[in-house]
Structure formats: C-alpha cells, structure tokens
Amino acid sequence: MQPIKEIYPLLQVPRKIVITTHQKPDADAMGSSLGLYHFLLPFGHEVKVISPTNWASFLNWMPGCNEVLDYERETDQADQLINDADWIFCLDFNTLSRIKRMETKLKQSAAKLILIDHHQQPQTEVFSFGISDTTKSSTAEMLFDFITESGHESKITPTIAQCIYAGVMTDTGSFRFPATSASVHRLVAVLLEKGLQHTDVHQSLFDNFSENRFRFIGHVLQNRMEVFYEYNTALIAIPQADLIKFDIKTGDTEGLVNYPLSIEGIRLAGIIIDRGEERKCSFRSKGNFDVNVFARNYFDGGGHVNAAGGQSKEPLEAVVDHFKKAMMENRATLSTYQF
Ligand code: 5GP
Ligand code: MN
C-alpha cells in the first residue's frame, strides 16, 4: 500500500470512482463516504457510493444518502460500476470480509483500491494506496485530513461539513472517548466556520426515535441485561422474537451496548443480537480492557481497543455461554481494571 498522498496530484483528472464502506454502515461510515462523494464530484469525477447492505433509516437525512446503492438490492447496477471503476475508495473498514458479498467482486476488479480507515490490523496487501491510522477518532476525521492535506480546505461546503461532523461526533461518543484529540476540536471549529449547523446533526441523529425503538430500550434494560459485578461486566442478549415484537429495524439497536457502561464499576459491556441469519455481537470497554483482541479471539471479529464487534453462527444461548466463558478467562484483566 503506497501512501495516500501519492494520489493528491491525481485528484484533478476525472475518473470513474466508487466509494464503499462496511456492511450496515454507521454514521461514520456513511458520513465519511458521503463527505468524500460531495468532495469529489466538483472535480468532474463520476462518483457513486455503494453500501454492501442496507443501513439505518436515521441516516437517511444525510445529503446524498438517497443516491447510495444498496449492494444487496441493486447488485447488477453496483457490479457494473465496480467493473468500470478506476478507483474504489474503501472507508471505515480494512478487511474485505467486512463488505460481505461485495468481497469477491472487489477482489476481481481491476480498479485501484484506496484505503482510509482507523481500525486495527489492516489488510494492507489488497490496497494500492491508503492511510491506516488507529489513533484517529473516526474515518470522517481522516477524510477531513485528506481534504486539507491535499490542499482543498476551501472546497469544504456546509454539506461536506455536516457529513464529516456526523462521523466525528458519533465515533467519539459526542466528544468523550479518549481519541477526541485537540485536533478533533480544531476540526470542529473549522467546520463551524464553513457553515456547519451542528444542532441539526444532533437532532437528526438522536431525536428521531420511533416510539417502538424507545420502548424497546426500556424492555431490553429491564429484561435482557445481566450484570456480573465480580467481572465488572454486563451482557445484553436479545432474542429474535423481541426484534419482531417491537418491529426493530436495521440500526434501531445502535448504541444499546453503551448503556451498561453507565452502571458504576462496569468496564466491559457486551450485546448479542439474534438477527436470524447470525448472532451479531458488539463490545464496549473502558480503560485497558482491549475488546478488539477479545472480539478477535472469541467472536471472529475486531475493531478498536474500546469498541469492537463480531458474530457467530451458533444459537443465542450458546453464544451467551461462550461470552461468559470468555469473560471468566479474562477475569484477571477485568477485575484489576486500570484507566
Ligand atoms: P459495532 O459494535 O458498532 O458494530 O462496531 C464497533 C467497531 O468494531 C466498529 O469500528 C466496527 O467497524 C468494528 N466491528 C464490528 N463488527 C466487526 C466484525 O465482525 N469484524 C471486524 N473486524 N470489526 C468489526
Ligand atoms: Mn469509524
């Protein structure tokens, strides 16, 4: 993988460009993809964003979201774009397994793959150009750096600012996680000067719950959460029947995993959701408990030190047992927690 700065001089030449991100994109994935989309269009490039799967409806307000292709629903059109592409930007993921069925297609493509990502252990051999920086708060922050370092800060419009802000704000937990550096705050200041309406972004993302989604949270915290104080750990396990009963859609479970970390003493929070075709797991931690390693070792996953995910094909009860065993095996670290 050559450094991303190698493509800066090439930005001016119109190309066929696809931008993609991880399956079930979150606000950082979608925000950085759409921010890049709006940045590239005025250069005269043909640009399209392709998501490997559908996404949460609370992202639909993002400018350009209605132009994004869902690979699972619009496979033929997306395949054609991938075949024809000169460049494929890969944002907010670094291993091709994160793009589900698009993986085979990308491997066959003659396009140059360009990585912009902040996760651990990148599959660098598959990318022609790129940047991987695990110290960065978000991929959206890295997009901001990409735009400014390539000399194009003046091209940041209020639309691009909104997309970048959505990614940075959500991936930093509203500016509270350790990766919220001074440069993150400086970036926000620049975005505000560019015309960002930050209140709109917060409201669009957080004040748009359906009543069902809100009541579902109450149900889950009351009935589906177990707390293991001796391990400073809490686990939420959600059967598929709950998702059906509350009419839960993609993205409605987003953020649930964070709630147990508000309990005094809890350092590790896990959630296992029975999505039918698989059990999806998310993990969050505080301090030195590395959930990236935890997810890799036990749940075929990965992510960051304090936020990671994985999956399993086993039944829900078996995955819960597996989590409890994993928790016990990590007792030494979990019970001697350090900031
Ligand atoms: P979430 O729990 O919100 O799905 O994901 C937390 C973090 O872990 C995100 O940065 C996400 O990209 C990463 N992640 C989630 N699931 C997986 C997975 O199955 N494999 C890998 N490598 N990373 C994951
Ligand atoms: Mn991210």
Image (spheres, rainbow, N blue to C red):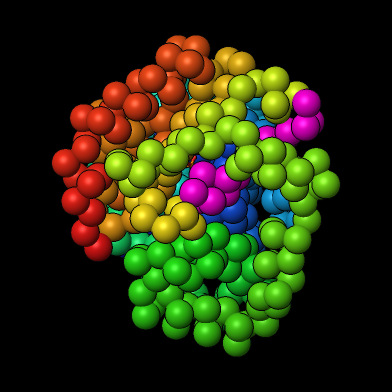
Q: Position of residue 19 (x, y in %)?
A: 54, 45
Quarter assignment of residue 180? bottom left
Q: Is residue 281 visible?
A: yes
Q: Quadrant of the C terminus?
A: bottom left
Q: Quadrant of residue 112?
A: top left
Q: Which residues are magenta?
A: 245-260
The answer to whether residue 252 is magenta is yes
Q: Is residue 173 left or right of residue 265?
A: right
Q: Residue at x 54, y 51 (%)?
A: 259
Q: Residue at x 61, y 16 (%)?
A: 276
Q: Position of residue 317 (x, y in %)?
A: 48, 16
Q: Residue 100: x percent and y percent? A: 50, 25
Q: Nearer the viewer, residue 277 or 129?
A: 277
Residue 60 against residue 241 in the figure, above or below: below
Going 47% across and 55% down the picture, which residue do you hit?
A: 263
Residue in the picture at 60% in, 87% down: 193
SS assignment for the magenta stretch, majority: loop
